[in-house]
Amino acid sequence: MYELSGQRIRQVLDFAVSSDLCALKKGKTQVTSIATPKGAVKGVLNNVDRHVLIASACCKRASAVATWLRDLSDGYTSFNLDGTKDFSAKRMPGPFVVNEEKPKLLR
């Protein structure tokens, strides 16, 4: 699981995921698909508040999704999913932070 946070995180995810974030109310979750250059990855988004969401994806692909989102935030990669280079000045709204969430132990 990854915590996604930032002033414009919802704007970023409007471009990067397939779900309707306007319909995602605080404290609720929704199934989504995250587009990456290596294909779409199914996952779940949990709306913590206006600027923080928790994303989880298939264990085998979770780190690739986190890396892709971090690269988008930093502007190190093109958003062109076909792999073509992008030399334009357009970038994802950001920056935003992608932090790994540590599992909480139940007592």
Image (spheres, grey):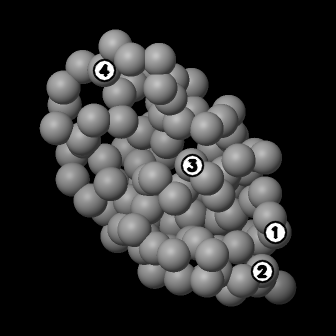
Q: What kind of residue is marked 1?
A: Asp
Q: Is residue 58 visible?
A: no
Q: Earlier in the sequence, mark 1 or mark 4?
A: 1
Q: What kind of residue is marked 4?
A: Asp
Element under disc 1 = strand
Element under disc 2 = loop
Where residue 12 is drawn, which disc sits there?
Answer: 3
Element under disc 4 = loop
Structural distance between the alpha carbons of marks 1 and 3: 15 Å
Q: Position of residue 99 (x, y in %)?
A: 67, 45
Q: Earlier in the sequence, mark 1 or mark 3?
A: 3
Q: Nearer the viewer, mark 1 or mark 3?
A: 3
Structural distance between the alpha carbons of marks 4 and 2: 35 Å
Structural distance between the alpha carbons of marks 1 and 2: 6 Å
Q: Residues within 10 Å of mark 2 (few under 14, many from 20)?
A: few
Identify the residue under disc 2. 26
Q: Earlier in the sequence, mark 1 or mark 2?
A: 2
Q: Position of residue 24 (x, y in %)?
A: 64, 80
Image quarter hosting the C terminus:
bottom right
Structural distance between the alpha carbons of marks 1 and 4: 33 Å
Image quarter hosting the N terminus:
bottom right
Q: Is residue 40 left or right of residue 18?
A: left
Q: Nearer the viewer, mark 1 or mark 4?
A: 4
Where residue 17 is drawn, which disc sits there?
Answer: none
Q: Is residue 29 above or below residue 99?
A: below
Residues marked 1 and 2 touching at CB (< 8 Å): yes
Element under disc 3 = helix
Tell me where residue 55 sits by quadrant.
bottom right
Q: What kind of residue is marked 2?
A: Lys
Q: Is residue 91 above or below residue 101?
A: above
Q: Is residue 71 above or below residue 64?
A: above
Identify the residue under disc 4. 86
